[in-house]
Image: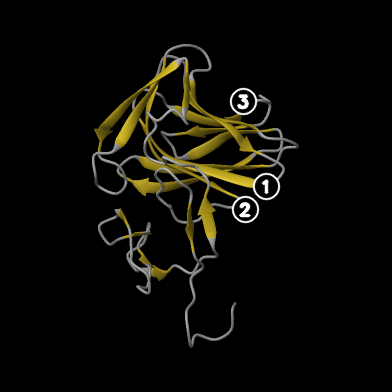
Amino acid sequence: TRVNKDGLIETVGSDVPRLDWLNSNCPSLLLEPQRTNDFIYSEEFNQSVWVKSNSTITTNEIASPDGKSTADLLISTASGGGIFKYGAWDTTQKTISIFVKKNSSNTAEIFNASSGTNRVVFDLDNGTITTQGGSMTGQIEDFGSGWFRISATHTTTSGQTFGLKPETNESLFIWGAQSESAANSTSYIKTSSTSVTRQKDVCGDAGNAD
């Protein structure tokens, strides 16, 4: 995928240069390494792989960053309520990202549900990080129209649980979850029932690999 001139995420075919317009009036050529999105059903949070604890999901509530009405509403119904993915953090360094948009919750939190000190809290009013706890680090990117892509990088000693939550009894719009075995996130890779790998970009006749 890339961000097109209209600010929307779109899929580009093989052998088509990915000219990316994210937060710019002039596109840049995306040249990224091979990556796999290990999260299945990356846009379908009603699926059973996404565990809803003290929370509810309403599907296809508003327009997502690709312009389609596929973003879901996550509502926390009690303390700690959110969505969870078992075994998402493991002995490999992982970066997990997801697109979020404020509804009634002013913040979103990514955390290791198996170890509560490892967490990152994101301010959705100002597009900033307010808390980085334990060994987890975060990043936030503005995708326009109130959408932010938030990410957290973390390594644990065993398979532990990823969690995302709004403030208690509040709500967020969510879309496009991704898990990569790396120290940073790359462009969004959509999945359904299986993980998906994007091959590395190669630009011929452009000098050396750097």
Read off the residue under disc 3.
113
Mark 3 vs 1, N-terminal side? 1
32 or 14, nearer to the observer: 14
Residue matched to label 1: 93
The image's mark for residue 182 is 2
Q: Earlier in the sequence, mark 2 or mark 3?
A: 3
| Residue 10 place in picture, x, y as percent | 31, 57
Point out the image quarter for the C terminus: bottom right
Residue 43, quarter of the rendered image: top left
- Image coordinates for residue 13, horizontal then vertical, percent: 33, 67
**Residue placed at 49% from the left, 42% from the top?**
39
Residue at image position (67%, 47%) is 93
User: Which class describes the residues within 10 Å of circle 2: few (<14), some (14-19), or many (20+)?
Assistant: some
Percent x, y of residue 133? 67, 32
Give the Cα distance between marks 3 and 1. 17 Å
What amino acid type should be assigned to the residue bearing mark 2?
Ala
Q: Is mark 1 on a helix, strand or loop?
A: loop
Question: In the figure, is residue 17 to the left or right of 205?
Answer: left
Q: What residue lies at 41% left-to-right and 33% top-to-bottom? A: 125
Q: Residues within 10 Å of mark 3 (few under 14, many from 20)?
A: some
Name the image colouring. secondary structure
From what the image shows, is residue 7 above or below residue 210? above
Q: What residue type is labelled 1?
A: Gln
Q: Residue at x 48, y 30 (%)?
A: 108
Secondary element at image label 3: loop
Dot 2 falls on a residue whose secondary structure is loop
CB atoms of marks 1 and 2 within 8 Å: yes
